[in-house]
Amino acid sequence: MNRTYVRVLIPSIWAPRGGQGARDAHLVGHSTDGTVAPSSIVAMTLVTVRYFAAAAEAAGVDEERLELTDGATLGALRDELVARYGAPMQRVLRSGSFLIDGTVRREAGHPVAERVDILPPFAGG
């Protein structure tokens, strides 16, 4: 079962209010009563990703925990891994596969699980 939690994204952009300058500045996304705008609340899931062989070489680690938005798919995980590790990971994922709950998955729309194994293509017979 995925561990889901809520993360409050606090913007770091200050904007002047009413053109009065810094003394009347407020944090964008916050109201004057200190509450956070609903659009700043995002449900997140922690996923343990284990890498094997060429995937571990591309990532530089054997295992890591990633935060993904709740309901994330393999396509979103693939995009995150390519953004983090670039062309070496992209080559592995192009012909490799994901192991989720003991089943090999390649469909971009399949939901991630609490643990995902990244398997490179295997040679041999």
Image: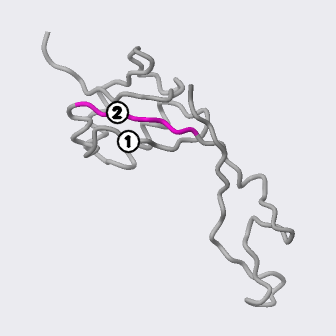
**The magenta segment:** 45-52
Percent of width and height locating residue 30: 78, 66
Tag 1 residue = 64
Residue found at the far left of this picture: 124
Quarter placement of the C terminus: top left
Q: Earlier in the sequence, mark 2 or mark 1?
A: 2
Label annotation for residue 50: 2
Decide which of 22, 49 is in the foreground and name it.
49
Q: Residue at x 52, y 39 (%)?
A: 46
Q: For residue 45, which quarter of the picture? A: top right
Residue found at the far right of this picture: 33
Q: Is residue 111 above or below residue 11?
A: above
Q: Residue at x 73, y 73 (%)?
A: 27
Q: Is residue 62 above or below residue 123?
A: below
Q: Residue at x 65, y 65 (%)?
A: 11
Q: Is residue 51 magenta?
A: yes
Q: Main secondary structure of the magenta part?
A: strand
Q: Residue at x 42, y 36 (%)?
A: 78
Numbered marks: total: 2
Percent of width and height locating residue 74: 47, 30
Quarter placement of the N terminus: top right
Q: For residue 8, which quarter of the picture? A: bottom right
Percent of width and height locating residue 32: 85, 72
Q: Amino acid at mark 1?
A: Glu
